[in-house]
Image: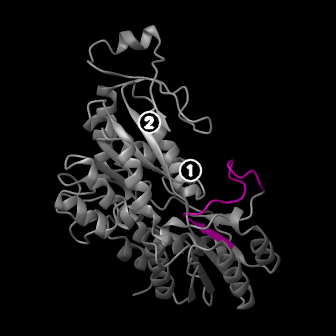
Amino acid sequence: MLHMSRIRVSSALIAAASAVSVLIAGCSAPSDSSAQDVPSRSLEQVQTLVDQSYDGTDRPLPADGPAILADQNLWIVSCSQGAPGCATPTLSMKEAAEKVGWQVTVADGKLDFSTYSTLIRQAVAARANAIALVAIDCSSVQQPLAEAKAAGVKIYGLLSFDCDDPDVGGEKTFDASLGLGGADTPLSTYLELLGETAANHIIASTDGQARVVEIYEDDVLFDKYVGAGFERALAACSECTYERVTIVAADYSNGNVQSKAAAGISRQPDANAVFSPVDALVTLGVGQAALAAGPDTILASVGGLEPNVSQIAAGGPQTFAAGLPFTRLGYAAVDDLNRVLQGSPQIDQGIGTQALDADRNLPTCPAYYDGNVAADGTPMVDYRTTYATLWNVA
């Protein structure tokens, strides 16, 4: 379905934007989208947001905290160790947890809901002190989580949504989740910001004439919220259109990502941009499919994983990323979980975001986004050393 724009601009807003050649205004959107009745923005306003996104929003790392709780048995249940967005924070969390002396088991969910449930029950049987769910939403594993809580196991969410999320409407089940964008900032708000960052980049880069093929997924709340932020920002563009290409979690493993993306691009021959809610989809075929849209096509995504940064550095097919530091998340999660296990307050772990492209903020060492990037291509902070000092480990 092609989503067109219609102008909803007050006279005051028109007057305020009279010095700008193109107005960004309200856009019709799907009935389930938060992109309806969006206030107008001028291209000048959008460009200001784009410029700010390159500055980065990371904040200071924790300066103090409780001593590490000894003798903990941690199970990390990953949505899939074959999916980089799940595997990267999982392995980083394992590394950090082993540094503090915890016993760690990584369990591969293989993108299968029934496997998630089985692994949670195995963790309970193994007398885990805590289960960390990586990109696994509570709504897909409610019963085994109830069993785990009844057994006294702490449930921790990393890139995962609890059952009390408004999109689910259930009761709170997680003991805690890692806060991104601030300790009290909902994960949904942070992810919507990443989507908005990508949309604003596309709007500014096309002078408000974006024709976007949007890779859309709503059976995973992470991707759904990124998409909601993207559509809301794009809805402010009176001359922009987007067409959803819907995928489901099963497409990550059944080879349908590229064929679905290619079909969507063929339906929009004038497309000048493609948006993917996560980097993994780019390397699973969206990037290859985007080549058919032409050499100047913008391909924006969320993440900054090494294969995607490599594409950006080479000039494509991916050209832009709203940074999400998947590796840093693992260390932050261990510090956060240590506080939760001891009943200490959660604090801001300092994780923000930053826009990156071939000309600005391109990571070089490491060659993936690992937090706000300095001028030399390295992270601005050495979080590994900071956490090791805080935890009193080598």
Who is closer to the viewer here, 207 or 344? Answer: 207
**Which residue is drawn at the image coordinates 19% and 55% (left, top)?**
358
- Determine whether the residue tagged by mark 2 lies in a helix, strand or loop: helix
Left or right: residue 87 versus residue 369 is right
Say which label, 1 or 2, has the lower sequence index.
1
**Which residue is drawn at the image coordinates 37% and 31% (left, top)?**
240
Give yes or no for residue 163 being in the magenta stretch: yes
Image spot of residue 222 (x, y percent): 54, 57
Snapshot colouring: one colour
Who is closer to the viewer here, 32 or 187? Answer: 32
Q: Which residues are magenta?
A: 155-170
**Which residue is drawn at the image coordinates 33% and 28% (left, top)?**
45
Image spot of residue 149 (x, y percent): 78, 74
Mark 1 or 2: in front is: 2
- Determine whether the residue tagged by mark 1 lies in a helix, strand or loop: helix
Q: Quadrant of residue 115?
A: bottom right
Residue type highlighted by circle 1: Ser
**Which residue is drawn at the image coordinates 29% and 26% (left, top)?**
44
Spatial CA span between label 1 and label 2: 15 Å
| Residue 190 shows up from this direction | no
- Residue linked to disc 2: 233
How packed mark 2 is, by other alpha carbons closer than 10 Å (few <14, some 14-19, many 20 or more), is many
Q: Which mark is residue 188?
A: 1
Left or right: residue 131 versus residue 268 is right
Magenta: main secondary structure equals loop
As drawn, which residue projects farthest toward the right?
150
Residue type highlighted by circle 2: Ala
Image spot of residue 228 (x, y percent): 52, 43
